[in-house]
Image (cartoon, rainbow, N blue to C red):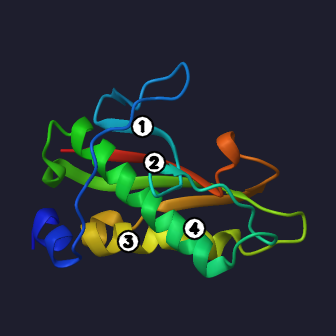
């Protein structure tokens, strides 16, 4: 099944690349690797401002991470010249979870992105990963995720 068939099956429409909010670019390609800048969680078109362990549950955070993965795939599609079938492998995901000092489920929040990437890309979507709890993320967002992919 192609990536686009899977997206259609999951009823996912990829967004266009977001305009950077600061002095950076959405992605950079070096050789066959493409490095996507961090994407923050959004809800209703605005930063999804919240802190895990205080304002939202792990399940809500997981939904936020899934939403970030959809945005990342939109940017990755642009980096692939419009064809996600060029993705040879999702190599690495790094997730920052805006969380209280006693919140310890960053890995479960990040599963929202990792599981979706696995669903969409199959074995090519299984990746190395880091998940960190941080005191704050730009604009108060609850989750920020960056991604590295290898292109064919």
Q: Local crowd at mark 3 within 10 Å, few (<14), some, or many (≥20)? A: some
**Which of these two is toward me, 93 or 139?**
139
Mark 1 vs mark 3, CA separation in Å: 19 Å
Upstream in the sequence, badge 1 or badge 2? Answer: 1
Q: Position of residue 73 (x, y in %)?
A: 31, 52
Q: Residue placed at 42% from the left, 75% from the top?
A: 115
Q: Which mark is residue 35?
A: 1
**Which of these two is toward me, 124 or 10?**
10
Q: Quadrant of the N terminus?
A: bottom left
**Residue behind mark 3:** 116
Residue 40 falls left or right of residue 114: right
Q: Local crowd at mark 1 within 10 Å, few (<14), some, or many (≥20)? A: some
Residue 112 falls left or right of residue 26: right
Q: Position of residue 13 (x, y in %)?
A: 22, 61
**Which of these two is toward me, 96 or 22?**
22
Upstream in the sequence, badge 1 or badge 4? Answer: 1
Given contact means CB atoms under 8 Å apart, are the residues at marks 3 and 2 in contact?
Answer: no
Q: Is residue 97 above or below residue 35?
A: below
Mark 1 vs mark 4, CA separation in Å: 18 Å
**Residue behind mark 4:** 110
Residue 115 falls left or right of residue 17: right
Of labels 1 and 4, the one closer to you: 4
**Residue behind mark 2:** 147
Q: Residue placed at 21% from the left, 73% from the top?
A: 11
């Amino acid at each position: 099944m192609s990536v686009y068939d899977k997206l259609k099956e999951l009823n996912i429409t990829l967004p266009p690349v977001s305009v950077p909010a600061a002095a950076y670019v959405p992605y950079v390609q070096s050789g066959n690797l493409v490095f996507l800048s961090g994407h923050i969680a959004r809800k209703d078109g605005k930063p999804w401002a919240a802190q895990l362990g205080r304002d939202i549950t792990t399940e809500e955070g997981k939904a936020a991470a899934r939403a970030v993965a959809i945005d990342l795939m939109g940017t990755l599609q642009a980096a692939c010249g419009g064809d996600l079938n060029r993705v040879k492998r999702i190599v690495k995901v790094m997730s920052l979870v805006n969380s209280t000092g006693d919140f310890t489920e960053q890995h479960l929040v990040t599963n929202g992105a990792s599981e979706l990437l696995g669903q969409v890309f199959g074995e090519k979507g299984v990746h190395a990963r880091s998940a960190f709890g941080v005191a704050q993320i730009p604009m108060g967002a609850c989750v920020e995720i960056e991604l590295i992919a290898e292109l064919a």
